[in-house]
Image (cartoon, grey):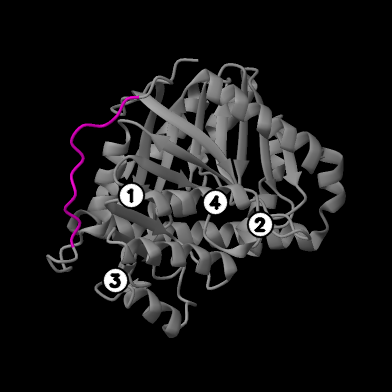
Amino acid sequence: MKIPLYRHNYRGGNQINLLQSGESFFAAVEKIIDEAKHFIHFHTYLIDEDETGIRIINALIRASKRGVRTYLLLDAYGTKYLSNEFVDSIENSGILFRFFSPTFVTNGFQLSLRLHSKVVMADGEVALIGGLNFADRYHGTTSKKAWLDFAVIVKGPECVQIHSILKRLWNKKFISKQERAYEVIHIPEYYEENVKLKVLQNNWYRNKIEILKNYRSALRHAQNRVVILASYFLPGRNERKLLKNASLRGVDITIVLAAESDAPMVDRATHFLYDFILRSKIRIYEYLPSNLHAKVATVDGKWSTVGSYNLNHVSDYASVEINVGILDEPFAQKFEELLRSIIKNDCREVTFEEYNRRQTWYNRLSGWFSYQMIRLAMRIMFQMTSKQKKTL
């Protein structure tokens, strides 16, 4: 499979490790924080004031107290339920902390950009990028399985670019000189594994649609098989056309969605697309044990992507998203094996017969209505961001 890389040149010399939601993920995050010596960037959409969230905040507080310069950037909307006492404990710990963007910008009544990326970096040497937030539901318990999601740990020269992105997101013009991130990475380390990868952004205000372009390129040039796990799956017209055309030329496409979602309107809108997907001879599976929160894909056992980006227009036009695109056959093949194991053991296939049995007149109407309402909201959002993006 030949994937045109546009202007995104994949860089070799990296090491990459895959993580899945559950204790192993949070232990890895805590290890990165505890081993940091100079600085930490911690950016996320959501951190809950529960056992898991408090555990991670305590690790950041420990780092700050031992002299590690710690930058904590949380989305203002995703973390709006944090108590004042919890926020005060963070601010009083020495952590450099702020919320990303108010919910609305009053100038022109523009919807503001959301920080949906989830990245942890230490010392410019190691970065964790994925789709997991920091809350108990991503950790799971003995009686309740964790929400399914993935992340990767990256070491190597691409950390220079990751650091540059995080630094720019933190260094807003209005913050004081004392709060600004000033660290510079001079000589990155190269690893024998020599994994080729590229950190990709979606940030419509900055004219960045790299993840969307990467997905489109992968679908356009897929030859044999595609596996997509998608939490909030509402692909645009162009993406639906690419999926259909790939299927028509014989590509085996499998899409795994949530059996039960935490976003009911999006779930109903996604179900409205089932007819199109199935008629395009694309297989649909639903993940059963818990909510599916993953946003990952593999193509032809050669290319993979892991990160925070959802295949929908919210991720395209209203969110800061960061994914890692990976051009490495051993990684892609091992990742695909894991995904197919999940499909085999934890999913059910939705056939045309089953889909038709589900479709009462109420389900059809609510699906159509949800789909149209979300499309309308996306059009309004697109117009707002299009008018303002060049001035931000």
Which residue does the image show at 66% across and 50% down from the upper left? 292
- Label 1, label 2: how far apart the Cα atoms are: 25 Å
Label 1 neighbour load within 10 Å: few <14, some 14-19, many 20+: many
Residue beneath label 2, please?
A: 267
Left or right of 200 on screen, residue 31: right
Mark whose residue sits in front, 1 or 3: 3
| Three-letter residue code for mark 3 | Gly
Most foreground residue, 211 or 180: 180
Secondary structure of the residue carrying tag 3 is loop
The answer to whether residue 265 shows anywhere in this view is yes
The quadrant the C terminus occupies is bottom left
Most foreground residue, 302 or 135: 135
| Three-letter residue code for mark 4 | Ala
Residue beneath label 3, please?
A: 94
Label 4 neighbour load within 10 Å: few <14, some 14-19, many 20+: few
Residue 320 on the magenta segment: no
Q: Position of residue 12 (x, y in %)?
A: 35, 22
The answer to whether residue 348 shows anywhere in this view is no
